[in-house]
Image (spheres, coloured by chain):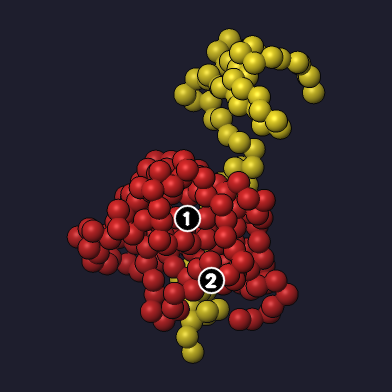
Amino acid sequence: MLVLSRKVEESILIGDNIEIKILDVTGDKVQIGITAPKEVTVLRSELKETIEENKSSATGASKDLLQELFGKK
Amino acid sequence: MIIKTRDFGEIEIDEKEIVTFKCPILGFDDFKEFIVLIDESIGENFAWLQSVEESELCFTLANPKLIGDDYKPHINDDYMNAVGGSYDEMWLIDVISEKVSDSKVNLKSPIIINTKEKLGAQAISESPLPIRYQLFAGKESV
C-alpha cells in the first residue's frame, strides 16, 4: 500500500481524472472530497456488504418459502 | 392503478401508497418507487418491498420487532431529511434461507419510511451494527 501524508486542502491525483482532497480533520474523523468521472463507482467500503445483501434479498426467498416457514398454521 | 408484482401477480394498489426513495436502496439507484406489501397469511413480521417500476424487483423485509426493543439504530440527519424529517415505519432487508437459522437481516442499514409523506430511504446507521445478523440463530424452525 502506498502511504502518503497530506494536510487539509491538499489532494492526491489518481490517473488523469480522479482527485481526492482532504477537506477537514477533526479528532479521528477525516472529511474527504472526491472528484471522479460519473462512471467510476465511489463507495464507502462498508456499503459493499449492504449492496450484496440487498442483491441477495432481491433474488432470494419466494413467497412460497416464506409461507412455508412463517405462514400462520 | 394495477401493477405487476414478482410474488403476487397483478394487484391493484392505491397510488397514494407508493413510497418514493429519494435516497436509493443501495445498488438499486435507478429505482425510486416502491410499495410495501404484507401477506395476511404471514402477518406483519415480514413484508415485501415491491418496485412499482420493475415488476421483477422485490426485496423481502423483516419487522424490527423480531430483533427486540433494544434495536434502536442511530439515523443521521441526512437520512432523516431524505424522508421529510422523521420516520414512523422501519423494516430490515432480509435474506431468508430454507435453513431458518441461516436467515439474515441487515441491522446496519434499515429501510425507514415516513408513511405520511410517502418518503423512504435505506439509512446507513453510524451505530456499530451487523450487516448480516442471524435472525433466528440456532433455531431449526420458528
Q: Residue at x 70, y 30 (%)?
A: A27
Tell me the colour chain B is drawn in.
red
Q: Position of residue A1 (x, y in %)?
A: 80, 23
Q: Amino acid at mark 1?
A: Ile
Q: Earlier in the sequence, mark 2 or mark 1?
A: 2
Quarter of the image with the N terminus of chain B in it:
bottom left
Chain of the residue on which disc 2 is drawn: B
Question: Relative to A4, is B63 above or below?
Answer: below
Q: Position of residue B111 (x, y in %)?
A: 47, 55
Secondary structure at badge 2 equals helix
Residue reaching furthest front? Answer: A27
Q: Position of residue A30 (x, y in %)?
A: 65, 27
Secondary structure at badge 1 equals strand
Q: Residue at x 73, y 75 (%)?
A: B138
Q: Residue at x 63, y 19 (%)?
A: A22
Tell me the colour chain A is drawn in.
yellow
Q: Amino acid at mark 2?
A: Lys
Question: Relative to B33, is A66 above or below?
Answer: below
The label number, if any, that marks residue A38 in the structure image? none
Judged left or right of residue B83, residue A19 is right
Q: Position of residue B14 (x, y in %)?
A: 22, 63
In the figure, residue A5 lies in which quadrant?
A: top right
Residue at image mark 1: B111
Q: Is residue B30 visible?
A: yes
Residue at image mark 2: B65
Q: Residue at x 52, y 60 (%)?
A: B92
User: Mark 2 Cα within 10 Å, few/some/many (few <14, many 20+)?
Assistant: some
Quarter of the image with the C terminus of chain B in it:
bottom right
